[in-house]
Amino acid sequence: MKTATGSLVIRNGQIIDGTGAAAVPDGVVVIEDGRISYAGSATYAPELPAGAQQIDANGGTIMPGLVEAHFHATYFNIRALEDLDIKYPVEYVSLLSAVNCRLALECGYTAARSGGCLFNVDFWLKTAIEQDLIPGPRLSSSGREICSAGGLMDWNPEFRKIGMEGLVFIINGVDDARRAVRALVKDGVEWVKTYPTGDAAAPDTNDHHTLCMTFDEMHAVVQTAHNHGMKVTGHCRATEGIKNALRAGYDALEHGTFMDDEAMDLLLERDVAVVPALYFEKASVLRGEEFGLPQQVIDGHQETLDGGAESALRILRAGGRLGMGGDYGFGWNPHGDYARELTYFTKEVGFTPLETIMCATKTGAEIMGRGDEFGTLEAGKLADVLVVDGDVIADISILEDRDRFIAVMQSGIVKAGRLAPAEHTDVIVQG
């Protein structure tokens, strides 16, 4: 990914640095060759470089670019889970995914961690973004997911005579678990996504209190992945599934929905980050009937929403780490609505705006393993910056409106927002 050259100054806005510290009024951010050299009060700012380019924050907010920590680039606003693996070929899924990546960047998300995808597309999306072939967030890739036979993601009945290989590896036992991880090693992904538990979406077979993998399978996944320098996460709603994941050595948890005291102690002892991804549940309750979800499923999502919100607040207040990512890519929870997760946690769960933003920036970057590169506005870090026309502490829902973005920057280059360069099309004549 290209890095800006020269000097750039962002001024006339409050600074939220992403660390959880109080906002700095009348802040200044100085960027030199794509990296932050100063972020703080205008009173103590160094002498500004001669001829530096300047951006006026219009009295609004200067903050780190957001991190979507549970990103499904290859989910194309589906109406049913079954659409995922049989509706479109990989060629079209790839095109749709590139559009989703561009949209995420335009929504202020300068980085994202994949929560699983079809056909290993996210590895190649990451490559294309880093080579500036397409716009999008900096990505951590995950590729195809792993679930035991008969589990949440194994929905194609035997009579169809088709597998699930484009979306998920279906395993039966420890040897299959190791084989699946080794295939992901060859795919080049960073995160191995598993399904230790079920979900409210499958109330009759794999509901949100059901286990979908054995401990031995989960441990085999971790051993194999860690041997190859990969990290492991899992869709963990059921209490015993959360404990199994923590005991098996998982590096992160998705959802962490139903936590008891023992699970909380294990989590805090290992300092494992959790991405609750609750707006999917909220949207399922609000719009489920509109999309034909059975009442039993909607009721299950309500239970999951209530339990997940309680657990998330408890984790934060106990000093645990949370990332923000809302499981977007369903018809009722579409791409582009990412910041609704931030509004929900602030206005309904009980996080302060600064706590929510810290989770959505600093902790997200840490989960990606890149907390030393971006996620906060600190000297030496890449200038991945979001400049917002408005006070996001007074009203965090401003982040839902991308028309309020003055600039979305990666490495000091404005990629989206009002100040982004106008698009143009070059006609290339070959001959």
Image (cartoon, grey):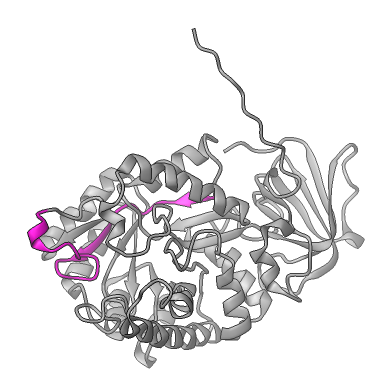
Q: Which stretch did the figure color magenta? A: 137-161
Q: Is residue 419 left or right of residue 147?
A: right
Q: Is residue 129 above or below residue 44?
A: above
Question: Which quadrant of the figure contains the N terminus?
Answer: top right
105 vs 248, nearest the viewer: 105
Position of 355 with respect to 200 (left or right) is right
- For the residue pair 283 and 246, the one nearer the viewer reads as 283
**Quarter residue 160 falls in:** bottom left
Residue 333 x, y percent position in the rendering: 47, 67
The picture places residue 340, in percent across and down from the top left corner, at 58, 70
Rendering coords of residue 165 (x, y %): 20, 52
Q: Is residue 139 magenta?
A: yes
Magenta residue check for 330: no
Q: How many numbered marks appear?
A: 0
Q: Residue furthest top?
A: 431
Instruction: Give the quadrant of residue 64.
Output: bottom right
Q: Give me the residue at 56% from left, 85% from top.
A: 349
Q: Is residue 176 left or right of residue 26?
A: left
Residue 276 vs residue 17, the one in the foreground:
276
The kind of secondary structure the magenta stretch mainly shows is loop
Vertical placement of 363 versus 103: above or below? below
137 shown above or below 413: below
